[in-house]
Amino acid sequence: MADGPNGEPCASPLDLFNSIAAQGELVRTLKAEKASKDETDSAVKMLLSLKMSYKAAMGEDYKADYATEASEDFVDPWTVWTSSAKGIDYDKLIVQFGSSKIDKELINRIERATGQRPHHFLRRGIFFSHRDMNQVLDAYENKKPFYLYTGRGPSSEAMHVGHLIPFIFTKWLQDVFNVPLVVQMSDDEKYLWKDLSLDQAYSYTIENAKDIIACGFDINKTFIFSDLEYMGMSSGFYKNVVKIQKHVTFNQVKGIFGFTDSDCIGKISFPTIQAAPSFSNSFPQIFRDKTDIQCLIPCAIDQDPYFRMTRDTAPRIGYPKPALLHSTFFPALQGAQTKMSTSDPNSSIFLTDTAKQIKTKVNKHAFSGGRDTVEEDRQFGGNCDVDVSFMYLTFFLEDDDRLEQIRKDYSSGAMLTGELKKTLIDVMQPLIAEHQARRKEVTGMVKEFMTPQQLSFCFDT
């Protein structure tokens, strides 16, 4: 990672945006004041260095107009923030990350390939961005195999509803494409980043695995693994970690992830561990020694920096680039400026919450798009773009017609904030209760899901 204009180390990709803007202004000032050639050349050299660091971090050239907007939206694997009550501007994020929009044409192609109606997460733009999904469909339509990879960083015993989003969608993908799935539990990451013991991190893996299994994954086509456990028993996995490590420099990971010289070396090397499941021979018990099986990764878009690095490295070690499907963020109850957090119980609806707790959280904490008075609500209507209860319904109310009617009623003033919140409560209470009931039934299945074994599918290529 390059230093800032005054020689200080940049702490994150956001600092790069701001540093480039500041350094560019310095260069313009020096030229306007006809400063010495040496001083101007030195400033220009620093500006070019910062822009190279930006390109290494973001996978695209620096754009001057983005620097003026960098303070409005910021996304990396650990921080999601925006100044807009509507949430992150995902169209700008697609441009910034260099991914592709999931458009109607791609959704229609997925429907033709699977013979199934697209999931409402696709229809509503919750999964909104992709990398190389058309390539995956090309392979699938030509009877060539692919597999799914997603994951969870187990930072607490209880997961919240936002954590379910990638797993709900991945379950649908597994069903309609009939493909195997690997789920990485990055307990090593949480040990490195959080104040946890190794035993605590692993115990969270086991508890979180129960919630993942409760989503309904096929035990014959799913392998869930703990990094702390699997790394030591799979030579194929560790060999790929080492291969990736050899082809990623310290400067690259500092630029991509914002690591500083004071970060422990475990953090600096962790991205290669998250990259390794993207390659099929990391799982010899499933794929044997095959290195050419395409991987498709459904994940929230804040995880994309890991896989930009992975995709850049893959050709250099002889592997296919993983494809990705990116989801939007599930907003905190207090508003869409940030995503839910396990550290703030009032920002989230947890999978362990009772019906009473769900009702209280929604009524007390869910940010409203309503007006100041009932009279104004009736006259002007509510704002669905900022109302968290409506946002949550777009995730969990599957009936398109009913959702559209709610949008019309709330926007016109026919439905008030209290009625909208009650609608959400009526959706969330049974959803959580049903999940809790399924979770009770999977306790004895965790070991079977987490045991490396041959999965039941055919991969003749």
Image: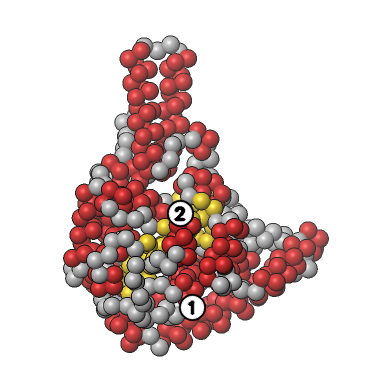
Q: In this orientation, which residue lies closer to the viewer: 333 or 327?
A: 327
Question: On screen, 16 above or below 169?
Answer: above
The local secondary structure at tag 1 comes to loop
x, y percent for residue 456: 34, 80
Q: Is residue 373 visible?
A: no
Q: Which mark is residue 453?
A: none
Residue 122 is situated, as x and y percent measured from the top left of the image, at: 56, 64
Left or right: 362 as drawn, with respect to 437: right
The numbered mark at residue 353 is 1
Residue at image point 56% right, 59% down: 106
- Looking at the picture, tell me which residue is in the foreground, 458 or 44: 458
**Which residue is drawn at the image coordinates 32% and 15% (left, top)?**
38
Q: Amino acid at mark 2?
A: Arg
Q: Identify the secondary structure beneath mark 2.
A: strand
Does residue 240 show up? yes
Residue drawn where x is 65% and y is 58% of the image: 385
| Residue name at image x 61 percent, y 58 percent | 104
The percent coordinates of residue 420 (x first, y second) are: 68, 71
For disc 2, the marked residue is: 131
The tally of labels here is: 2
For residue 364, side relative to residue 24 (left or right) = right
Q: Are marks 1 and 2 in contact (CB under 8 Å)?
A: no
Residue type pointed to by label 1: Asp
